[in-house]
Amino acid sequence: MTATDGSGASQQRFALVLGGTGALGSEVCRGLHAAGVPTAFTYHRNQARAAALQEQLGQAAHQVSLQDRAALRALLAKLEAAGQTPSVLIHCAAISAGLTLQTLTDAAFDEAVAVNCSSALVAAQELLPRLRARGGGDIVLCGGLDRAQSLPLPVHYAATQGMLQTLTMALAKELGPAGIRINLLAVGALDVGLSTQLSPQQLADYKNFSAMRRLGTAPELAKAALFLALRNTYMSGKILAVNGGI
């Protein structure tokens, strides 16, 4: 798929998905493949799933810990050297452990901040000069429920979601003049992924108060992420809540 830069010239898109082996990330990778967008993705521990996706989709898998800022910067430099600088970045990585305020450790909090939020900032910072030279691009962050929702969440995970929301607006204001759009997809409870850490009662309550009376699916959310990444031209700094009508 091609895109038009600020000068009106047509350019080939290249996408990078951070967290490509997760429930949502893998569906985003499949959607990019179906759209004909060359794509690379990162993974951390799930090597078997990464290898399967790489073989199935022909997308390059890169093992990177998103806690390691230097490793993420090195990956982006490697892609640039290969002529594969991303014009589309989709951040699907997220972690959340079943910890309470009392059991939360410094290490667990720092890991959640690094993976869920800081890695997005680092990637945007590294891509800025490349995207500015290109004439623009798209960054899509994927987070949990937006701040208007009241579903109980682990405190460290909830804190990172608040960070993502304010980061999205701040980056949009700074990067907009360079033609770079950044938006946040607020993901509702799904039938896979992190949502499986919720209790049966929490999931039942979610479905009861949802207009759709059901959980979402990863393919449904991937469609929304791909719209923001590939079709959107004027929306930036916004939270798109796809949650079944909570």
Image (cartoon, rainbow, N blue to C red):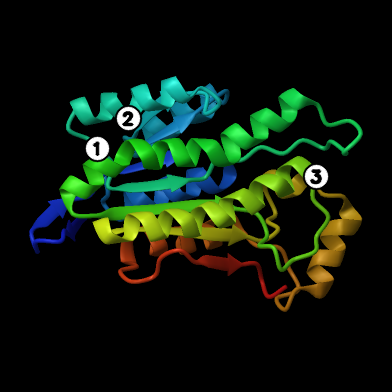
Residue 180 lies, in percent from the top left, at 31, 56
Q: Residue at x 54, y 65 (%)?
A: 239
Give the amino acid at mark 1. Answer: Thr
Considering depth in this image, is 230 or 69 the residue closer to the camera? 69
The Cα atoms of the two marked residues, 2 and 3, are separated by: 31 Å
The residue beneath circle 1 is 85
Mark found first going from the N terminus, 2 or 1 = 2
Considering depth in this image, is 174 or 17 the residue closer to the camera? 174
Give yes or no for contact between labels 3 and 1 (Cβ–Cβ under 8 Å): no
Element assignment for label 1: loop
Give the amino acid at mark 3. Answer: Pro
Residue 241 lies, in percent from the top left, at 59, 67
Give yes or no for contact between labels 2 and 1 (Cβ–Cβ under 8 Å): yes
* Residue 179 showing in the rendered view: no
Residue 90 lies, in percent from the top left, at 43, 47
Element assignment for label 2: helix
Neighbours of disc 1 within 10 Å: few (<14), some (14-19), many (20+): many
Element assignment for label 3: loop
Give the amino acid at mark 2. Answer: Leu
The Cα atoms of the two marked residues, 2 and 1, are separated by: 7 Å
Would you say 185 lies left or right of 16 here? right
Residue 76 - label: 2
The quadrant holding residue 110 is: top right
The residue beneath circle 3 is 154
Give yes or no for contact between labels 2 and 3 (Cβ–Cβ under 8 Å): no
